[in-house]
């Protein structure tokens, strides 16, 4: 097995794990955490990004 295919397999596993963790509930939790530390003026952008991420789950 070449190093490239090994890294590709690792990348695929990481991508699959990220998809498993990117549930709508987890996206909402992450957005709320970001909004706690970010200035209030960016809350709309955070919500928009969370909505887009949840659309991509469908």
Image (cartoon, rainbow, N blue to C red):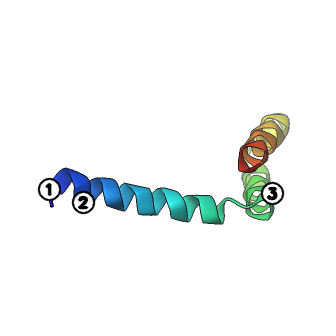
Q: Secondary structure at mark 3?
A: helix
Crowd class of label 3 (few under 14; some 14 to 19; many from 20; radius 10 Å): some
Residue named by callout 2: 6
CA distance for labels 3 and 1:
39 Å
Contact (Cβ within 8 Å) of mark 3 with mark 1 = no
Residue named by callout 3: 28
In the rendered view, tell whether residue 34 sits above or below residue 42.
below
| Residue at the image point whose x is 78% and y is 35% from the top | 45
In the rendered view, tell whether residue 28 sits above or below residue 53.
below
Crowd class of label 1 (few under 14; some 14 to 19; many from 20; radius 10 Å): few
Query: Furthest-front residue in view?
Result: 1
Give the mark, 2 or 3, whose residue is nearer the N terminus. Answer: 2
- The x, y position of residue 53, in whole percent, is 72, 45
Say which of marks 3 and 1 sits in front: 1
Left or right: 7 in relation to 41? left
Q: Secondary structure at mark 1?
A: loop
| Residue at the image point whose x is 83% and y is 42% from the top | 47
- The x, y position of residue 30, in whole percent, is 72, 58
Question: Which quadrant would the N terminus be assigned to in this image?
Answer: bottom left
Residue 20 image label: none
Residue 56 appears in which quarter of the rendering? top right
Left or right: 34 in relation to 1? right
CA distance for labels 2 and 3:
33 Å
Query: Furthest-left residue in view?
Result: 2
- The x, y position of residue 52, in whole percent, is 76, 39
Residue named by callout 1: 2
Residue 2 appears in which quarter of the rendering? bottom left
Left or right: 10 in relation to 19? left
CA distance for labels 2 and 1:
6 Å
Q: Secondary structure at mark 2?
A: helix
- The x, y position of residue 42, in whole percent, is 79, 36
Contact (Cβ within 8 Å) of mark 2 with mark 1 = yes
């Amino acid at each position: 097995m070449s190093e490239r295919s090994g890294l590709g397999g690792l990348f695929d596993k990481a991508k699959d794990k990220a998809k498993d963790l990117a549930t709508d509930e987890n996206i909402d939790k992450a957005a709320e955490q970001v909004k706690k530390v970010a200035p209030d003026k960016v809350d709309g952008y955070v919500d928009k990004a969370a909505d887009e991420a949840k659309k991509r789950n469908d």
